[in-house]
Amino acid sequence: MTPEIHGIIGYTITPFSPDGEGLDLPALGQSIDRLIDSGVHAIAPLGSTGEGAYLSDSEWQQVAQYSLAQIDRRVPSIVSVSDLTTAGAIRRARFAQAHGADALMVLPSAYWKLSPAEIRQHYRAIGAAVDLPIMLYNNPATSGTDLPVELILQIVREVDNVTMVKESTGDIQRMHQLQVLGEGQVPFYNGCNPLALEAFVAGAKGWCTAAPNLIAELNLGLYQAVRDGELEQARALFYRQLPLLDFILKGGLPATIKAGLGLTGLPVGEPRRPVFGLDEAGTERLRGLLEQLR
C-alpha cells in the first residue's frame, strides 16, 4: 500500500565531482540523510534541483537506485521520471518502480509544443506501464507546456494512477480551480516557493521544495502551523523565510541549494554545465540570508 504523501516534500540535489564530470554518491547519501533527519515528510529525487535533465541514462539510473536505497522507505519517495520522449519516461518509470519508488512525478517535457491529445496520450502510456501513483507536474517555465486545469482534470479522470497534481505556475488561482473543479477530490501540491502560505490556505496537501536542504525547521513549522489553524504564526514563519525562498527561486535551484549546502559544511560541487554555480557576490548574499535565519 502506498504511504500517504503530504507535508514538506524535499528535493535532493545531485552532487558532482569537482570537475563536474562524475557523480559524488556519498555526498548524495549525506544530503538525503540530512533531509530525513530534519523531519521532511517525503523526498523527491531527480527533479529540477537534482538536474535530472543533465544526466546520462546511466547516471540517472545510478542516482535513482542509490537514492532509493539510501531513503530505504524511511519516508515516501517520489522519483521524477520526466524525459523528452514517452519511451524514455516509461523506461525511467519502470526502473524507479523496480527499485522501490513509492510514486512518480511526470513533467510533459518535449522539444516540440505538444497538443492536448499528445499530452493525454503521454500520461496514458506511462500510467499503463507501471502500477505506481503518478504526480502530474505542471511547470511551463521548465517544460514549455502549460496544462490548463481542465486538461489536468481530464488526465486524472482518464488515467487511474494519475492521482496527484503538482502546480508550479505561480498562479494561486490554478490551485483554487483545482480545488473547486476537482470537487476537492484531487490532491494538489505547491511547487512555487513564494506561494507556500497561500497554497496551504487554498488546500494544498503538500509543498514540493528544495528549501529543506537549508531551512527545514522553518518549512516544517509553517506546515504545522497551518495544520493547527495558527494562521498568525504561519504568516510570521512564512514572511521570515520569504527572502531566502525568493533568493533560491531567482538564483536557480541547483546553484543556490548547492552553494547553501557548501556553506553548511557539505560540499556537493557545482551544477553541471551549461549552468553556472553561484558567484562570489551571490554566495555572500546567501550566507547573510542563512545567518539571519539562525
Image: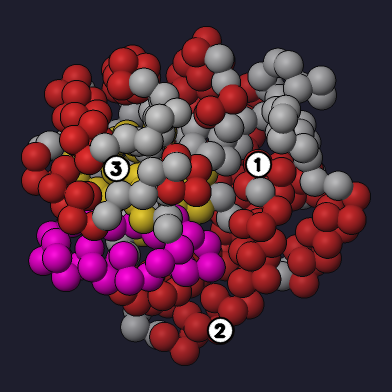
Find numbered disc 3 in the image and state the secondary structure of the residue it sits on: strand
Residue farthest to the bottom, as pictured: 232
Q: Position of residue 282 (x, y in %)?
A: 83, 55
269 is higher (above) or lower (below) than 198 = above
Please rate how many residues cluster around mark 3, counting C-alpha atoms within 10 Å: few if below 14, some from 14 to 19, many from 20: many
The answer to which image quadrant residue 113 occupies is top left
Find numbered disc 2 in the image and state the secondary structure of the residue it sits on: helix
Give the residue at mark 2. Answer: 236
- Residue depicted at x 47% and y 23%: 64
Mark sitting earlier along the chain (2/1)? 2
- Residue depicted at x 73% and y 16%: 21
176 is higher (above) or lower (below) than 27 = below
Mark sitting earlier along the chain (3/2)? 3
Give the residue at mark 1. Answer: 254
Q: Could you say which is closer to the camera, residue 120 or residue 248?
A: 120
Q: Is residue 267 left or right of residue 35?
A: right
Question: In this picture, which residue range is highlighted in magenta?
Answer: 170-196
Does the magenta portion include 133? no
